[in-house]
Image (cartoon, rainbow, N blue to C red):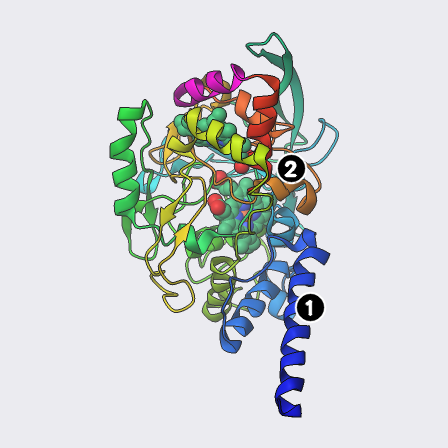
Amino acid sequence: MKPRASMLLALVAILCGWGAARAEEFPREAYSNPVAGLDAASEDMFYRGRVEFLRSWAFPPGGGEASGLGPLFNRISCAACHQKSGRGQPPSGPNERMSSMLVRLSIPGEGPHGAPKPHPSYGGQLNEEGAPGVPGEGRAAISWEETSATLADGSVAPLRRPRIKFVELAYGPIDDALVSPRVAPAVFGDGLLESVPAETLKRIAAEQPARGVHGVMNEVYDVISGRMVPGRFGWKANSPNLKQQIAEAFIGDLGVTTPLFPDDQCAELQPACRAATKSKNQPELPADRLDDIDFFNAHLAAPPRRDADNPAVVQGETLFLAAGCGVCHVPSLRTEAHPKFSQTLPAQTIAPYTDLLLHDMGEGLSDDRPDFRASGRQWRTPPLWGVGLVPIVNEHSLFLHDGRARSLEEAILWHGGEGEAAKTAYAALTKDEREALLAFLRSL
Ligand code: HEC
Ligand code: HEC
């Protein structure tokens, strides 16, 4: 072998070895990696988008390209809630502030295009913080009410459910509002979920009744096409696509305007908000930077599975399917090439463990707040890929839309409504079988 060729090989070996070591050395970054195979230009765009995701915004008129925070907002960056592109958690009690979750608000009736009707004084979500001269709206104090579930073998599992009380309200009472506390979900794999054809979701919905489950697609307003389209993102599939979801987060959670939502959203009865200083940048996040962050979010890879050959995991997978979990948490879906990023997100088979459909999960999980076509009891099946890494990436093991479940087992035991039969099947397992099923979930 010529010396140059062998040097090249050695270099390739070092680089490959380094790459493999990197994934193991930095397990907390498991949700932060780009999909494989990006060329240099695409990688540049991914990392430019990541800068936007991590960026801390500033109050206008200062802040340069980060100018535009507020007038009302929840956090100063996307990553504050979606830490390490992962999920948030609820406070442990009423004296702790919400740090990575938010509370959606509305009043009975429908807003434009069937959206929830914003509260006249507080809008569509509680914004705890305000820019100078604009009082933050107040705080949602969460306290936990203990309950429990009894399994078939007589063992008792403690459960808890949240109670929300509004305190320090700056704009009058919130009486009679419909209230939905939601933790930030993980954001990896979303470009692939966006590439699952709506036809596939319709076919799954049509096949489910024979298996005792009735998934439905949410239907939400797409501001880009001006049409009602299937919902895909959010705990109630209340957002149609990644770009709009991101723009909604900028305006709703940070108060940053984009080409999709060019105006600050001040509630009807909030003059201080309307009078607040505007950024010189209009919109505050311009189109090219919104494209960068859209590209970043679309290309965050789902982490690979671990321990798939472990006998307990293999047994757990069989039990998962036998209990009917896979009817909603669909193990395998075929995507088509991404509508915008066909080169970098080509058609492929993915293992997200979701059907992206809404299911009636019973009274115990209901928030009593409709969201487009979703009723209070209906939630989108959350993807289970990556769920085993939550304790490592986010250093907690809190699950479900409001983070009430303190373990994967508690999450299962909250399943009611269409999920009741699967929960009962889980509760009827022996301790070893339950442990195997949980080991399977931890391998995802
Ligand atoms: C205050 C906490 C908070 C902040 C800040 C925040 N998010 Fe979120 N994010 C959430 C919550 C809660 C949801 C679920 C929303 C729902 O169900 O209505 C969500 C949902 C999402 C989703 C959809 C994930 C899925 O698979 O359903 C994406 C993508 C996302 N956010 C991106 C962003 C971006 C980009 C930013 C910054 C502009 C951001 N978020 C800022 C809390 C936050
Ligand atoms: C009828 C459809 C359906 C079935 C069947 C079902 N699930 Fe779920 N699952 C859901 C929905 C919807 C949620 C979200 C509920 C919420 O957040 O309030 C969920 C949430 C979860 C979560 C928490 C995920 C997260 O991101 O917080 C886990 C874990 C889970 N399910 C596991 C299971 C297991 C294990 C089974 C079988 C024993 C099962 N599910 C059966 C629909 C279903």
Quick check: 9 left or right of 244? right
Magenta stretch in the rendered image: 417-429
Residue type indicated by callout 2: Gln
User: Disc 1 on helix, strand or loop?
Assistant: helix
* Magenta residue check for 274: no
Q: Is residue 305 visible?
A: yes
Q: Determine which of the numbered discs, if any, sits on residue 291 in the image.
A: none
Is residue 199 positioned above or below 92 on the image?
below
Residue 272 seen from this side:
no
Residue 217 rendering spot, x and y as whole percentages: 32, 37
* Residue 5 place in picture, x, y as percent: 61, 88
Against 195, residue 290 (above or below) is below
| Residue placed under numbered mark 2 in the picture | 89
Circle nearer the N terminus (2, 1): 1
According to the image, label 1 marks what residue? 18
Mark 2 to mark 1 CA distance (whole Å)? 33 Å
The picture places residue 392, in percent across and down from the top left corner, at: 69, 44
Residue at image coords 35%, 53%: 335
Left or right: where does residue 26 sit relative to residue 378? right
Does the CB distance between marks 2 and 1 fall below 8 Å? Answer: no
Residue name at image x 30 percent, y 50 percent: 197
Left or right, residue 97 beside residue 42:
right
